[in-house]
Image (cartoon, rainbow, N blue to C red):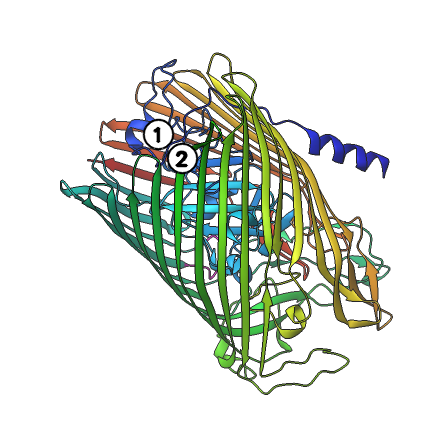
Amino acid sequence: MCSYAFTRGVSAGALTLVVFSSAAAQEALPTIDVAAQERRPTQGTGKPGLQPPNGKLQLDIPSTAGSRLGLTARQTPSSVAIVDRATIESRGAQTTQEALQRMPGVIASDPPGAAGSISLRGFSGTSVTQMFNGISLQYDVIAARPVDSWLYDRVELLGGASSYLYGQGAVGGAVNYVSKIATRGQERNEAMLMGGMWFNRRASYGINKQIDPSNWVQLDVSYKGSDGYMENSHHNSGAGSVSWLTDIAPGLSNAIAVEFQSEQRNSYWGTPVPRPSAGNGTVAWGTYGLPVLDLISDPAIRYKNYNARSPVFDQQVLWVRDIAEYELDAETRFKNTFYLYRADRQYQNVETYRYDATNTLLERSGSFATRHIQSLVGDRLEAVNETRLFGLESKSVVGIDYSLNQQTRNSSTESGTVDTVDPYSYVPIKSYEDNPAATGYIGGARSKLYTLALFAENRLSLTEQLHLVTGLRWEKISLERFNFRTPTAPSAANPFGDPAYFGRGYEPFTWRAALMYDLTKETNVYVSYSTAADPPSGILLTNNAGGVRNFDLTTGWQVEAGLKTDFWDGKGSATIAGYFIERNNITTPDPANTSAVINVGKQSSNGIEVNVGVQPLETLSLQANAAWIDPQFERFDEVVSIGGVSTRVSRAGNRPTNMARWIANGWINWDFLPDWQWTFAARFVGDRFADNANTMRMPAYTTFDTGVSWQILPQARLMAMVKNFTDATYAEWGGSAPLLRLAQPRTFEMSLKLTF
């Protein structure tokens, strides 16, 4: 306990080491010319803005994830990381999740049941908010499934409790995916063709063009497909965006942006692990009293997919935004964003596979079909003002956001084992509909979430070197759930039943207060305190009566300290952050009734993050990040069966699932000849557990990627890349069945990028 308290104190009090001369706040991103960005700038120019890929950190462009004030990452008193367009391409990241995956302290995966899965700072699920252009779908672990990265300008990451910015959720942090949109400035035409192993293929095109002195248009379209590295896992997706920016009058502009996505995927739910030996036989995973055992899959089934013959994991998405901006004068600006989102998702799968007692056959179960129809409509109005208060420089934003988020879920009702198969010779000959018990889509429930939010943020310069940054958000949330099935009365097994209708309201108030001090022109330090709120379990939109009916939202708080600096005569930059986070009121089984839950649980995490980028030569860029995380349940029970009797067992002191204590990433970009560049990347993830009992351990892994690019012509670049070139077999994500989602094996790809 003393050792834990000591490390907690050290990490929470650690000052973050970073960053170069403090740049003045910018209101909008500079125009990004990817081709020009990839050419090395002359050292010592001192110009703020974008850095070459995998070199110095992107500290001098505004981060919408970290603040609404237009602060750069350097000016924000929180841990902020940005991966820009050129870096996304340099790393070969083809989806939003691949772009996010190697940011500091992140583990991300797309298991079909929760395709937006992220762990960050010891938290996951609803406790990590994922936004698209600053808009939360309040259903992130499902709705934030990977999207073709061609549509996106950058990915931003904010660590720690941050509900004060974008609403309930974000105990562990927030992610913002920022789309390409019509911009003033340099016109662009670009295209990309890619092909590789597993019949991986991609074709993309984009243009930003000025129509006349007052109008600019942007268009991006992309097709992405693959036969999949697992059997029966092919997919095809199409995505596109179009936007139109108009300068209506001096100081007044309007942008209309539309995005669409369509994906058809044969899903892979995971690879089962043989039962552990016990005496002369085996014992089922999850049996109480098992020691810690490594989850090792059978190499003979490395590429097997035990889903149905024609599984369904499809979605169609439409985004519409209208953004009006008005500059009243040099000090005051207004911005109104109307947004509309609609998604239709379909699932038809057999989702669970377990070895039998002899470890020779697989029992397939979890036959399930569901259709989700989600819509979100809202409007956000905000005003920014720069002035002097009592002689002190002040910048403020205030605003109001109102939205209606509703979802209809129509799910099947079958249960039990589907069949028993030979794991080595399994060939999917049956589709979901061939299961005699399959019911197909049946009307289930509709949930409506009304949210009214008032927010404010301020940066007050107490002196030229000392800045106070504050923010707050008050929300009024109303939840309604309509049950389309036969209502059920409360019982011992289900203390709340499932009524025809129930409603619940919440009024979370979250805030941040931070001090940032400029030690020198190149170095500043900060300390911040922030709060958050999210559901005690599950997701508000899809929870049942027992999960939310009698409970308020959880409360979370974080203290963080850090340092940002430039060093080595401006050739390098770094950030260091130390933090402690606590989340209270999570649900745990009721001591008086193991079928019921009460919200008295607690979870905590403390850690240190380091992010460093160096460009020692004009032809050489180096970047690395590392995170040490110590998450644990402080107070949490789980119901287990011991001798056929359901019993509460404490998991206090255990690590939550899919959380690694150590995560590290590194990159090298070297222009070894004129027009030739070599790229090398490495990733290490420490061991994790697939269950709260911490008996199912996924071993640590290390992967390496490498690639060579050739600038054939000023307008054409050819790139060859090998991902996971040591062909490591490892679990990207794990579930307590146990099912391991095995990651991509060694994969070779080639791409041609054209700019004209």
Taking the magenta stretch, the answer to whether it contains residue 231 is yes
Asked if the residues shown at circle 1 and circle 2 are in contact, with their CB atoms under 8 angstroms apart, the answer is: no
Residue stretch rendered in magenta on the structure = 228-234
Residue at the farthest bottom position? 486
Is 670 positioned to the left or the right of 740 in the image?
left
Query: Image quarter for residue 552?
Result: bottom right
Q: Is residue 261 above or below residue 20?
A: below
| Front-most of residues 654 and 430 | 654
Which structural element holds mark 1? strand
Name the kind of residue labelled 1 in the image.
Ser
* Residue named by callout 2: 386
Please give the name of the residue rendered at 38% of the width and 24% of the height, measured from the top-left corner.
Answer: 48
The residue pinned by badge 1 equals 709
For the C terminus, give its image quadrant.
top left
Q: Most prominent secondary structure in the magenta stretch?
A: loop
Q: Is residue 162 visible?
A: yes
In front of the other: 367 or 566 = 566
